[in-house]
Image: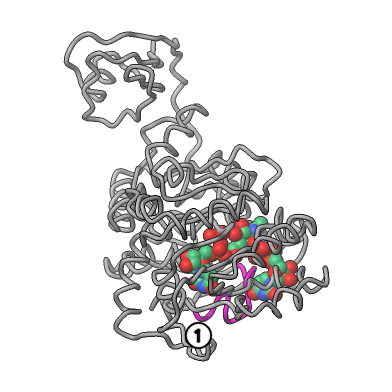
């Protein structure tokens, strides 16, 4: 079996690293294709070193540009590599342009696609990431889904539960493994030594790069307004290149940089960043990955967005959406600082993203599909079977797989009381309401 991993940005490298590592350990043939969307060493090369994974076999160096140009160039480059390498499955991760390009190209070449971190939905189609993740989900063969909530998003859109694997999120694998390594190594980045971060209290780690925040002057101004007033905090801000550019263009960079309690530094390597976040009192962010890492590292998070595709972090109690509203940011930040009981509750929120075995579960499922021949994408040769859509209330003891076999059917939706649940094979259906397709 040959597995091709496509990645292009910082979070994709971090979240694919545990899977790349697992594939290597099992001796499976693999290639890594970098789109070159992120190219600064602080946004790309350093992560291959920190996460101890092989450097990419291909880099198609698309660089920065508009969405159409970037995605188009990626598609051209990815197609050439995939036609040459002929992998059995292509893995894409998350919701960047690499995911859109990789999924579209692989599907047209009839190569199976595994979407890692599938099923997330912000329901905000103005976000490029929402378009990318939905397109990847439409074209995928296997879905590696962090939580039952995200799996239910896919069921509600009509996807078959048979190809959905609830694996947790590989960010937990990366976080647990590399925090240990980081603790043994200690801080390495010079800018952190200069700040004497070891002995610093009341650290607020800030990251922001989301287009809908940093490209809109009014929103950045509001956020900076809140930062100015958080004088009791040591705000450490490893700045994303996009944000540095826009702050400079808006003439806001110096104003922020001149604040005594705000420390703007270049983007950090993964080990330094994990040490910084785990030592923080509070994380203020619009990052997707950081919302997950905050709850994994037991640090309260305030998310600078009006919606999130990670609602589990909010319902678990570890994350609060504050938008870019100065007063809402201040009210919640001050509460975390002043109200110990409230802060403790946020810290102790249960982690919805698993126990750190996500890479193992993902590669197990891929090997199983390969052995069963389920990665072969071929035009059908059987006349399609017709089916009727039905609903039933189940009164007997019967599991999902027994029901599907007895009734020659596929369960779509499953309600336990008024809660939708995921139809895992061994779930007992007694007392539940289901919808299903019955083949004639
Ligand atoms: C991209 C992803 C976003 C992800 C983020 C992770 C898309 C649509 N967006 O956003 O989902 O959360 O990566 O960080 O795929 N730049 C540099 N050096 C670099 C990379 C970028 O200077 O190495 C600057 C360029 O000016 C570029 C800007 O940052 O125009 C934005 O980069 P881009 O990759 O287009 O989007 P991100 O904001 O990084
Ligand atoms: N990160 C890092 N150094 C930094 C800032 C972030 O290593 O200076 C890591 C962080 O731990 C997380 C990932 O980058 O795993 C998040 O990437 P980003 O916020 O760029 O993208 P998103 O997750 O929003 O797509």
Q: Give the farthest residue toward the front.
A: 338
Q: Is residue 390 in sight in this rendering? A: yes
Q: How many marks?
A: 1
Q: Identify the residue shown where x is 44% and y is 75%.
A: 201
Vertical arrangement, residue 220 with respect to residue 266, above or below:
above
Vertical arrangement, residue 57 with respect to residue 290, above or below:
below
- In-front residue for pair 185/39: 185
Instruction: Answer few, some or many: residues within 10 Å of disc 1's Cα (few below 14, many 20 plus, some between 14 and 19).
Output: some
* Prevailing secondary structure of the magenta residues: loop
* Residue 44 colored in magenta in the image: yes
Vertical arrangement, residue 246 with respect to residue 298, above or below:
below
Give percent across and percent down for residue 324: 67, 52
Q: Identify the residue shown where x is 33% and y is 70%.
A: 24
Vertical arrangement, residue 370 with respect to residue 255, above or below:
above
Give percent across and percent down for residue 302: 53, 54
Q: Is residue 11 in sight in this rendering? A: no
In the image, which residues are magenta?
Answer: 35-46
Quadrant of res 82: bottom right
Q: Identify the residue shown where x is 25% and y is 20%.
A: 405
Looking at mark 1, is its residue's CB closer than 8 Å to ligand 2?
no
381 sits left or right of 59 in the view: left
* Residue 215 colored in magenta in the image: no
The chosen color scheme is one colour
- In-front residue for pair 224/407: 224
Give percent across and percent down for residue 423: 32, 28
427 sits left or right of 286 in the view: left
Q: Mark 1 — residue?
A: 192
């Amino acid at each position: 079996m040959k597995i091709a991993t496509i990645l292009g940005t910082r979070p994709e490298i971090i979240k694919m690293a545990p899977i790349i590592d697992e594939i290597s350990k099992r001796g499976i043939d693999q290639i890594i294709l970098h789109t070159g969307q992120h190219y600064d060493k602080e946004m790309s090369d350093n992560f291959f070193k920190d996460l101890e994974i092989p450097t990419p076999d291909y880099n198609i160096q698309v660089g920065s540009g508009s969405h159409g140009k970037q995605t188009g160039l990626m598609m051209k480059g990815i197609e050439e590599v995939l036609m040459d390498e002929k992998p059995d499955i292509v893995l894409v991760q998350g919701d960047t342009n690499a995911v859109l390009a990789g999924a579209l190209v692989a599907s047209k070449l009839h190569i199976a696609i595994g979407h890692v971190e599938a099923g997330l939905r912000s329901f905000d189609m103005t976000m490029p990431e929402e378009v990318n993740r939905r397109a990847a989900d439409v074209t995928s063969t296997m879905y590696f889904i962090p939580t039952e909530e995200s799996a239910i998003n896919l069921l509600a859109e009509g996807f078959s539960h048979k190809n959905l694997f609830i694996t947790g999120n590989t960010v937990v694998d990366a976080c647990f493994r590399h925090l240990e390594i980081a603790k043994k190594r200690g801080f390495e980045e010079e800018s952190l030594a200069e700040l004497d971060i070891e002995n610093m209290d009341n650290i607020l780690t800030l990251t922001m790069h989301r287009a809908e925040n940093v490209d809109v002057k009014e929103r950045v101004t509001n956020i900076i307004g809140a930062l100015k007033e958080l004088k009791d905090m040591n705000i450490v801000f490893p700045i994303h290149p996009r944000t540095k550019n826009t702050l400079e263009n808006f003439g806001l960079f110096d104003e922020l940089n001149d604040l005594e309690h705000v420390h703007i530094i270049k983007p950090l390597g993964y080990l330094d960043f994990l040490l910084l976040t785990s030592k923080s009192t509070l994380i203020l962010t619009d990052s997707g990955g950081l919302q997950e890492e905050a709850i994994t590292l037991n640090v309260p998070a305030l998310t600078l967005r009006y919606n999130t595709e990670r609602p589990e972090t909010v319902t678990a109690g570890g994350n609060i959406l504050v938008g870019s509203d100065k007063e809402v940011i201040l009210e919640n930040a001050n509460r975390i600082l002043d109200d110990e009981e409230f802060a403790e509750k946020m810290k102790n929120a249960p982690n919805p993203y698993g126990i750190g075995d996500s890479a193992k579960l993902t590669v197990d499922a891929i090997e199983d599909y390969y052995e069963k021949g389920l990665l072969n994408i071929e035009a059908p040769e059987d006349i399609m079977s017709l089916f009727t859509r039905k609903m039933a209330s189940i009164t007997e003891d019967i599991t999902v797989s027994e029901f599907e076999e007895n009734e020659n059917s596929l369960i779509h939706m499953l309600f336990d009381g008024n809660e939708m649940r995921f139809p895992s094979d061994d779930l007992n259906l007694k007392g539940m309401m289901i919808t299903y397709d019955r083949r004639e």
